[in-house]
Image: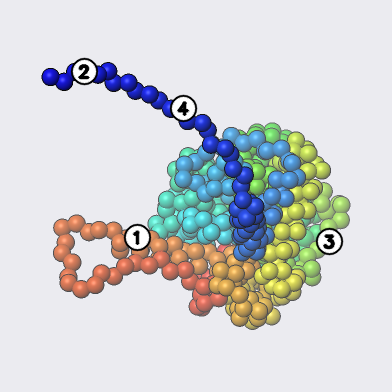
């Protein structure tokens, strides 16, 4: 029998190893890797800035200005386009395009924003040409079926709040623009002199003669009378023919109603300052509000107004004058809340960014303004209302069509593309997109013949290859700013 001997377990304590100093070669290797990483980051950053044309530097400088955020009641929208404001870019916009107020420039800005962000723009049916059957009160039946449901609406209409609300998303922001009544009415009288019956009756087409006795020429029941009195009020859906003391009360009440509907009323005389507010309202980047002035008259087509004539114009367009005064004061209250020095710095930044874009597009300054007959590219010729008024535009420099990437050409050309041509281009591209979606939609209870399946492709036609874009066949005036 084996005897049991006790099992004795002993443990040995391990002493910690003596720390060893890193080899100098390893330290140098680690430092080299860090430096290499920093160099790669720097190169990538510079490459990014060059690739995006300095857009990031504009954005950083804009925020460096330190302007307080513009208070807005807009809520975040899921899936919206990202912005640098800490909230998504707002993409549901209804811009009421008023007459002779720089609204064509704003419309061009909105068209380009929609294309960059793959948004849908509501466009008129063919029977309405490029306006929503103006001067009829807007109806959803005027919208082309290939352009619904829309994100943006911006073509001329007579505003109907109920119809626009039915058409647009619930979070749509409403914006419009007004102009000083004297300058606006002089422009209207010149532009529509051969189309508005109230103006055609005036001997020698004289604005002074019309203003001496306007009731001798004006007929409120005529279908084109909205060009001859309180045009802004009419465009906004109001009553243009309130007179006397009643007009004052009505104007005050109507201004309050417009203020409830429209989140921003821009002022043409303070266009860049208005864009400062627009950018904050919509949380847009600086590149989203860059522009080139469009649909302008030659100096020879303009008349100088004396103070006496300006006073008569304000008296004849009393409701428009009250609206302008109200919203001009409102604009400056909002700008003052931001801080006027800050606004001035941001306006300067906007103009610098615009100049940089122009240099990138055209190699220096903007192309020289030319009359329609002098513009070689027919697709860039603005529509001419009559032989008495010359609307100028821009010709496409040779270096734009022969050099640079397709995206650069597209951006540059569309900045100077007139309203009628751009509207038709958008309708064509959106119709192609609509049809491609329809073709790609699976069909039920049908058999497909053998063979390869054809895919619908949403093509993007180049604006300088639009084909023949002639005058409106009806001969009626459809272009205005």
Secondary structure under the numbered disc 4 in the rendered image: loop
Query: What is the distance, in whole Å, between disc 2 and disc 3 at their CAs?
Result: 126 Å
Front one among 465 and 234: 465
Q: Name the residue under label 4.
A: 13
**Label 3 belongs to which residue?**
304
Residue in the foreground of this view, choosing between 72 and 203:
72
Q: Quadrant of the N terminus?
A: top left
Q: Which of marks 2 and 3 is nearer the N terminus?
A: 2
- Is label 2 in contact with label 3 (beta carbons under 8 Å)? no
Residue 326 visible in image = no
Q: Name the residue under label 1.
A: 437
Q: Say if residue 25 shows up in the picture.
A: yes
In the displayed structure, 320 sits above or below 193; it is above
Tag 2 residue: 4
Task: State the residue at coordinates (50%, 67%).
Answer: 425
Tell us which disc is closer to us: 2 or 1: 2
Please report whichever mark, 4 or 3, sits nearer to the chain's N-terminal start: 4
């Amino acid at each position: 029998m084996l005897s049991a001997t006790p099992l004795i377990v002993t443990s040995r304590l391990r002493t910690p190893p003596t720390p060893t100093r890193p080899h100098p070669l390893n330290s140098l290797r680690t430092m080299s890797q860090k430096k290499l990483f920093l160099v790669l980051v720097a190169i990538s950053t510079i490459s990014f800035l060059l690739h995006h044309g300095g857009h990031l530097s504009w954005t950083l400088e804009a925020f460096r200005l330190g302007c307080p955020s513009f208070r807005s009641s807009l809520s975040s929208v899921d899936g919206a386009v990202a912005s640098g404001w800490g909230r998504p870019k707002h993409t549901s916009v209804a811009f009421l395009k008023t007459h002779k107020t720089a609204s064509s420039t704003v419309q061009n800005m909105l068209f380009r924003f929609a294309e960059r962000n793959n948004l849908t723009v509501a466009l008129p049916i063919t029977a309405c040409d490029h306006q929503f059957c103006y001067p009829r009160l807007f109806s959803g039946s005027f919208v082309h079926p290939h352009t619904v449901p829309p994100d943006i609406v911006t073509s001329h209409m007579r505003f109907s709040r109920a119809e626009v609300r039915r058409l647009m998303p619930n979070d749509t922001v409403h914006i419009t623009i007004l102009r000083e009544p004297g300058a606006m009415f002089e422009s209207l009288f010149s532009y529509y002199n051969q189309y508005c019956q109230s103006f055609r009756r005036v001997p020698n087409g004289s604005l002074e003669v019309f203003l001496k006795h306007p009731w001798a020429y004006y007929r409120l029941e005529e279908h084109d009378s909205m060009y001859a009195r309180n045009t802004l009020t009419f465009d906004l859906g109001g009553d243009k023919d309130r007179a006397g003391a009643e007009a004052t009360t009505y104007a005050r009440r109507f201004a309050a109603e417009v203020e409830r509907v429209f989140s921003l009323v821009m002022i043409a005389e303070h266009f860049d300052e208005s864009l400062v507010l627009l950018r904050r309202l919509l949380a847009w980047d600086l590149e989203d509000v860059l522009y080139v002035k469009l649909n302008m008259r030659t100096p020879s087509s303009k008349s100088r107004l004396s103070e006496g004539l300006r006073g008569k114009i304000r008296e004849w367009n009393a409701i428009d004058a009250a609206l302008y005064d109200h919203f001009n004061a409102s604009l400056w209250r909002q700008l003052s809340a931001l801080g006027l020095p800050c606004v001035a710095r941001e306006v300067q930044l906007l103009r610098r960014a615009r100049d940089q874009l122009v240099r990138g597009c055209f190699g220096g300054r903007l192309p020289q303004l030319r009359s329609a007959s002098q513009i070689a590219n027919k697709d860039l010729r603005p529509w001419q209302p009559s032989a008495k008024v010359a609307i100028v535009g821009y010709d496409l420099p040779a270096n734009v069509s022969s050099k640079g990437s397709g995206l650069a050409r597209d951006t540059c050309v569309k900045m100077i593309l007139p309203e009628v041509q751009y509207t038709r281009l958008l309708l064509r591209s959106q119709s192609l997109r609509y049809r491609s979606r329809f073709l790609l939609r699976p069909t039920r209870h049908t058999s497909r013949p053998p063979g390869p399946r054809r895919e619908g492709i949403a093509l993007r036609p180049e604006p300088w290859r639009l084909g023949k874009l002639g005058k409106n066949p009806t001969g009626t005036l459809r272009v205005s700013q």
